[in-house]
């Protein structure tokens, strides 16, 4: 089963543009980089992988002149394994006729991007592939969430919310199933192809082991694997919480410096991401530490040994992760943060939109929402450095609500579905 990725048309457009003669596709292992490139670009691109040890040396040693004789379009996969090959790529991209086009892909961000900075600076454009989104699982071409993130006024937000009330039928059912898949199993493409729950757990457990053995071996920066595993498991139990390095270090039996370093490796290998704390113009009233989120909830479940229904932290991580993946995949001009005051007021997600206005999000695991759920979304004007366009309570039910004061309640599924305007209003 091939799931069409939102990144595919972005990459195709770049690959034909003057700035996209050299492209890099990176991301965690098993997110579908090779599948995407082979399905969308081969042919006319000629595909080569450095993953196979037997052919790696021969492929790497071919000079730029020989590649030029072979053709003009190439995909080189797992290129982080042969950093010396980037010199050949540089020679190809520096040809005066400008006809050669190259797509590189790899998983180990530290090695790959450090090599790029040294050798291919100014010659390549980088894009990232994340686990499947709920919208991709639902085969949604343009999720309604994109319309919300493009709003520039409260009226525009209201219009999008009104559109959400008309999302129904198969589109809504597919989007609901897509988000349930993300909540239960994450978005790894292989997991989406498996039917049996036991097989899904086996695959995810093996993925975590393979990631540790291969990625950390590639990085070559973790001296004691057992220490790293302890930190990773402790971190998994704290998804959607504010990062406290001293507490993490204590529970993982590590020094704070080592805990901080290992957490950075998790982020560089796309296993986690940090959600910055909003500072605004009231910094003395606000918590300033970032919040930890796991990129894929299936991985988080395995590491935290949580096999029941999604708890509140996991629902929050799943939804924030969906916004994060969309923003990073499409390079949206949207800044993400969370807000927490020292007296306990908390906003799960703040999105600063292209026009400078904000949407504030409260994420609920329940199937209903009431105005009291929006209490932390009210009266944010004295904390924000731009206008609040709306406050949105995201829940797991079916009801769309519009409340006074620019507050709304939306089912999560509607945000990942294709918007459909009503025939008659």
Image (cartoon, rainbow, N blue to C red):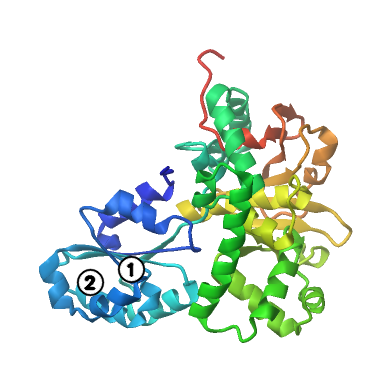
- Image position of 407 (left or right of 205): right
Residue of label 1: 124
Residue at left offset 63%, top offset 49%: 198
Assign a secondary structure to mark 1: loop
- Pick the quarter of the image with the C terminus: top right
Q: Between marks 2 and 1, how big is the CA–CA gap? A: 9 Å
Is residue 162 visible in this depiction of the protein? yes
- Image position of 296 (left or right of 17): right
Answer with the quarter of the image where residue 405 lies: top right
Residue at left offset 73%, top offset 61%: 304
- Pick the quarter of the image with the N terminus: top left
- Image position of 4 (left or right of 95): right
Percent from the top left, x then y, of residue 171?
53, 28
Q: Are marks 2 and 1 in contact (CB under 8 Å)?
A: yes
Estimate how packed mark 2 is, as few (under 14), some (14 to 19) or many (20 or more) residues with alpha carbons within 10 Å. many
Q: Is residue 220 above or below residue 245?
A: below
Percent from the top left, x then y, of residue 254?
76, 82
Is residue 319 visible in this depiction of the protein? no
Residue of label 2: 93
Residue closest to the eye, 190 or 72: 190
Residue at left offset 29%, top offset 62%: 19
Percent from the top left, x then y, of residue 269?
54, 69
Answer with the quarter of the image where residue 261 lies: bottom right
- Image position of 233 (left or right of 142): right
Percent from the top left, x then y, of residue 399?
71, 26
Residue at left offset 72%, top offset 27%: 401
Q: Looking at the image, is mark 2 or mark 1 earlier in the sequence?
A: 2
Residue at far left of view: 69
Estimate how packed mark 1 is, as few (under 14), some (14 to 19) or many (20 or more) residues with alpha carbons within 10 Å. many
Residue at far top of view: 424
Assign a secondary structure to mark 2: helix
Q: Is residue 73 above or below residue 56?
A: above
């Amino acid at each position: 089963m091939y799931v069409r990725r939102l990144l595919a048309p972005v990459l195709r457009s770049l690959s034909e543009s003057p700035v996209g003669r050299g492209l890099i596709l990176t991301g965690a292992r098993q997110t579908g980089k090779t599948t995407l490139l082979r399905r969308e670009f081969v042919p006319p691109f000629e595909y080569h992988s450095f993953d196979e040890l037997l052919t790696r040396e021969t492929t790497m040693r071919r000079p730029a002149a020989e590649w030029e004789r072979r053709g003009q379009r190439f995909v080189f996969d797992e290129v982080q394994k042969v950093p010396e090959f980037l010199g050949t790529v540089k020679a190809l991209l520096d040809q005066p006729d400008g006809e050669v086009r190259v797509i590189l892909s790899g998983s180990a961000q530290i090695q790959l991007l450090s090599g790029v900075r040294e050798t291919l600076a100014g010659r390549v454009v980088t894009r990232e592939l994340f686990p499947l989104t709920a919208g991709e699982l639902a085969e949604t071409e343009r999720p309604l969430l994109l319309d919300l993130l493009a709003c520039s006024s409260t009226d525009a937000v209201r219009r999008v919310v009104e559109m959400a009330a008309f999302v129904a039928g198969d589109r809504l059912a597919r989007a609901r199933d897509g988000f349930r898949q993300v909540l239960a199993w994450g978005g790894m493409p292989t997991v989406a192809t498996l039917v049996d729950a036991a097989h899904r757990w086996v695959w995810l457990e093996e993925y975590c082991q393979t990631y540790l053995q291969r990625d950390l071996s590639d990085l070559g920066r973790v001296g004691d694997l057992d220490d790293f595993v302890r930190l990773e498991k402790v971190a998994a139990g704290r998804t959607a919480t504010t990062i406290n390095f001293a507490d993490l270090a204590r529970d993982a039996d590590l020094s704070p410096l080592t805990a901080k370093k290992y957490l950075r490796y998790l982020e560089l290998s796309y296993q986690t991401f940090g959600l910055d704390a909003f500072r605004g113009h009231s910094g003395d009233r606000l918590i300033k530490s970032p919040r930890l989120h796991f990129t894929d909830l299936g991985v988080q479940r395995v590491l935290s040994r949580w096999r029941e229904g999604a708890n509140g932290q996991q629902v929050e991580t799943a939804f924030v992760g969906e916004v994060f993946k969309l923003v990073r995949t499409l390079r949206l001009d949207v800044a993400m943060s969370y807000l927490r005051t020292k007296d306990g007021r908390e906003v799960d997600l703040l999105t600063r939109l292209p026009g400078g206005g904000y949407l504030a999000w409260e994420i609920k695991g329940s199937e209903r929402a009431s105005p009291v759920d929006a209490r932390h979304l009210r009266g944010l004007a004295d904390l924000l450095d731009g206008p609040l366009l709306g406050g949105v309570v995201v829940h797991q039910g079916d009801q769309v609500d519009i409340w006074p004061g620019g507050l709304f309640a939306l089912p999560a599924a509607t945000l990942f579905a294709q918007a459909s305007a009503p025939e008659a209003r």
